[in-house]
Image (cartoon, rainbow, N blue to C red):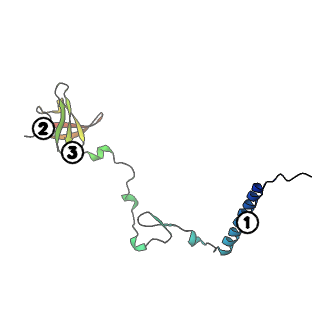
Amino acid sequence: MARSQDTFAKREREKQRQKKQEDKRQKMKERKANEKSKGLEDMMAYLDENGNLTDRPPDPRKKKTFRQEDMVIGVPKAEDRVADLPRQGTVSFFNTQKGFGFIVDAETRERIFVHANDLSSPIQENDKVTFMVQHGPKGLMATDVVHVK
């Protein structure tokens, strides 16, 4: 007569596996017995005024209304941002040999290209100037540049 091939460790592992399955079945039965029927209201999620998810409806007093006409989708065109008023700035770089440089606008702090043909008088770095802005082939360009003393 042959001996059983199952060792003690194998039998213990099998017992533990069957015990885990039985525990799992028992927990499932307990959950089903204690489960409340969830209605639609229990499953709803709401956004509060800060954009966070909550289980409570938002306060109607804090409701904000928006008009569709007031909403701007996208970035405004660069042409819309340029005003026809003279601007003031400081020459940050100017190469007299090549005939071009850059002016830093005092308000917007953006660098604007300037060419020697658009100067009314010679300028140097760190000079205060007034100028008009146009759209050039590669971006904004200063025209009518006047040195302010």
Between 95 and 20, the one lying in front of the other is: 20
At label 1, counting other C-alpha atoms closer than 10 Å, the crowd grade (few under 14, some 14-19, many 20 or more) is few
Among the 4 quarters of the image, the one containing residue 90: top left
Using the numbered discs, state the Cα–Cα distance from disc 3 to disc 2 in whole angstroms. 22 Å
Residue type at mark 2 is Asp
Task: Sort mark 3 into few (<14), some (14-19) or many (20+) by Cα contacts within 10 Å.
Answer: few
Q: Quadrant of residue 118?
A: top left
- Please tell me which of labels 3 and 2 falls first in the chain: 3
Which label belongs to residue 127? 2
- The residue carrying mark 3 is 84
Give the amino acid at mark 3: Asp
Number of residues whose C-alpha sits closer than 10 Å to that of mark 2, classed few (under 14), some (14–19) or many (20 or more) = some
Left or right placement of residue 137 versus residue 142 in this view: right
Amino acid at circle 1 = Glu
Q: Is residue 21 above or below residue 92?
A: below
List x then y, in percent, for residue 103.
Answer: 19, 38
Q: Secondary structure at mark 2?
A: loop
Q: Earlier in the sequence, mark 2 or mark 1?
A: 1
Instruction: Name the residue that disc number 1 marks.
Output: 22
* Image quadrant in which you'd find residue 148: top left
